[in-house]
Image (spheres, grey):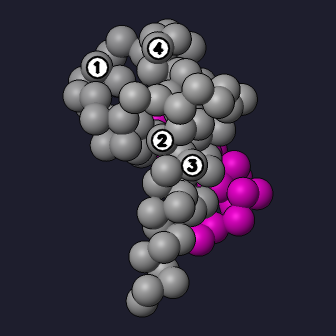
Amino acid sequence: MLPRTKLSEITPIVFCRQFKALETGMKMEQVIMAENERGTFKEYCLILSRELEVPFETVKSNWGAGIEFPNMPPRIRSLLKYVLDSRTAELIGKRQVA
């Protein structure tokens, strides 16, 4: 069951940016600058697919064109902050053990 505490929602692009920065160790400014490079949409589709356990084709085809993912279902959008916080804690914990 999800906690009753309401976390502020984040947008799909913020989720992807923060997740990429966390995974790669890049600064947020570097992540944003890298969005001009070819392949960013696919990379963000892969992040969303993997972390939300949604088929890649669903993300790519149904959630709208561009890295803003304007057609992401509200039900899934409301989970982004929970998933990001959970994965952040998990990844930081792994780094401290190593």
Is disc 3 placed on a helix, strand or loop? helix
Identify the disc placed on residue 85. 3
Per the rendered image, the range of residues in magenta is 24-42
| Tags 2 and 3 touching, CB below 8 Å | yes
> Can residue 5 be spotted in the picture?
yes
Classify 45 as above or below 19: above
At 59% from the left and 36% from the top, the residue drawn is 81
- Could you give the CA–CA distance between mark 1 and mark 4, rounded to whole angstroms? 15 Å
Spatial distance from mark 4 to mark 3, Cα to Cα? 17 Å
User: Of callouts 1 and 4, which one flags the residue occurring earlier in the amino acid sequence?
Assistant: 1
Q: Which mark is residue 75?
A: 4
Please tell me which residue lies in front, 91 or 16: 91
* Mark 1 residue type: Thr
Q: Inspect the image, locate mark 2, and give the three-letter code of the amino acid beneath it.
A: Val
How far across and how far down the image is residue 69, in percent?
52, 21
Q: Is 93 a magenta residue?
A: no
Residue located beneath label 1 in the image: 58
For marks 3 and 1 on the same chain, the one whose residue lies earlier in the sequence? 1
The answer to whether one can see residue 24 in this image is: no
Give the residue type at disc 4.
Answer: Arg
